[in-house]
Image (cartoon, coloured by chain):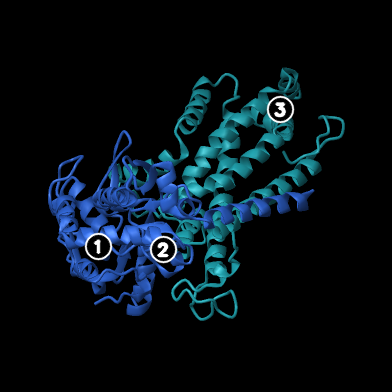
Chain colours: A blue, B cyan
Amino acid sequence: MKKHLLAAAITLLAAGSALAQAGDTLAKIKSSGALTLGVRESSGLGYTLGNGKYVGFHTEMSERIADDIQKQLGLAKLDVKYQPVTSQNRIPLVTNGTVDLECGSTTNSAARQKEVAFAVTTYVEEVRIAVNAQSGITGIKDLNGKTIVTTTGTTSVQTLRKNKRADGLTFKEVMGKDHADSFLMLETGRADAFIMDGSILAANISKSKAPQDYKIVGEVLSVEPIACMLRKDDPAFKKAVDDSIKRQIADGSLAKLYDKWFMQPIPPANVKIGLPLSDATKDAWAHPNDKPMESYEVK
Amino acid sequence: MNWEWQVFCQDTITMEVGASCFGKGGDVTYLDWMLSAWGWTVSVSLLSLVIALVVGALVGTLRTLEGRPWVVRLGNAWVELFRNIPLLVHIFVWYHVVPAIFPAMKSLPGFVLVVFALGFFTSARIAEQVRSGIQALPRGQRYAGMAMGFSTFQTYRYVLLPMAFRIIIPPLTSETMNVFKNSSVAFAVSVAELTMFAMQAQEETARGVEVYLAVTGLYVISAFAINRVMAFIEKRARVPGLLAAGAGGH
């Protein structure tokens, strides 16, 4: 009996992955007249305002990609559906066909490239250190013996581990359940430094009670290319997405979009994040590529 | 779905699969990490269980004392306090709010906190079971104790509690297993236990299915081990003819 159940489960799984592989997303979009976007509820590059409304730098960019695809396919109307995804379910939802294009804050990594494809890099995230402005910490060398917080389920934990090993530092590591929780540990003095993606640090600081009390200091600990994620082995769809992004870079609209979401007051609280375009991101725009984080070097 | 179980043999820094699945000389593989996380889960659970059983038995017993209304009220207040607040909220209140009021508590590590929070939370539920176990006994049992000239303490020690505990072993088994499953909230205050391992390792390796399956297996093994221990206790503690013979281990 048990063997039968196992066999049935394996058959189901096999059938599922076979379906997912037979993917021609452009044909699917054309026949259904709909494109499903994977969006984030709360991240630096995309978030929700509630009531099913999703905004942010990457969310708006992916809406423009959808417009370009609509033009390319000559559709009179393209229905854009929003599907919120999380770090845990984003890859399965892309591979099983629920989501056609995920533009959130997904790092392009070699491990993920085994399962999904990435469009050209549109944002290069820099992992930084946020501290209390009074703490006197100016870089990773000052973190010896300190307590450092980072968020569970992020690549920053790995970065921290690598730095710990490379610089021979000893520090106490605590992990927040989510970014808000991690920032609360910094605010309440349970941690001396919060190590995380620069955009997340900047956003948390800008939303805090006293933004002037915190600052982002020190060297860039790691750089990670962030890109839209799509199904593997679908070159036509990848080309359509890449072309749209290259078009947005070339005509300057992506830079304007960046300015809108990072340098101007944004909803819901109408506060500025104030994170200028980094050299790493400028470089990625100048030479569009889909290289994983493993081929990036910290300068 | 193609399985990639060698993900557990990967080093957590270089991401390379080593010859042995256990790291050497300070290197840590995902398997090493998962086993250490399992250790944290088991430690949190067992320590919380000890607190829960001791406090639960005490509070439950106090709530059945006759002629001591204030002691009973105190016991009721304890149960209602811990039963009416969700476990996760409990932990956050202890971790973030209480230290803001009493700064001395700031240095308390998350591990101690979660052991007490989970222990007290479960103690409220065990207290309720102990109380119902004692009250399920015929009133004649208490009078019999008094007729023997026993003090209140002796009546409980020799007459009421031995019977009440035998009656509540099945619900107590569920509760002890729940402690293991509820220990997953410990990750919220940065105890490096299994749930945190699962969230972190799946992010780093992108092999979520394998990681979650392994972690699920470890939770099942831990909770089921407790189930077997309780089934053994139930079998050994049974008084023939006194209670309906059950198979044990509910």
* Residue depicted at 46% across the width and 63% down the height: A233
Residue B113 visible to an observer of this rendering = no
Picture coordinates of residue B39 (x, y %)?
56, 60
**Pointer 1 indicates a residue of which chain?**
A
Q: Is residue A29 or residue A37 the one in the foreground?
A: A29
Tell me which corner region of the image, top left, top right, bottom left or bottom right, holds residue A276.
Answer: bottom left
**Pointer 3 indicates a residue of which chain?**
B
Picture coordinates of residue B49 (x, y %)?
58, 46
Q: Name the residue under label 1.
A: A246
**Mark 3 or 1, which is nearer the eye?**
1
Picture coordinates of residue A295 (x, y %)?
35, 76
Q: Mark 2 points at which residue?
A: A235
**Label 1 vs 2, first from the N-terminus:** 2
For mark 2, give the secondary structure. Answer: helix
User: Looking at the image, is B157 positioned above or below residue A165?
Assistant: above
Q: Name the residue under label 3.
A: B150
Give the class, few, some or many, for how many residues have Cα within 10 Å of label 1's Cα (few <14, many ≥20). Answer: some
Q: How far apart are marks 1 and 2 (CA)?
A: 16 Å
Q: Distance between the residues labelled 2 and 3?
A: 86 Å
Are discs 1 and 2 both within one chain?
Answer: yes
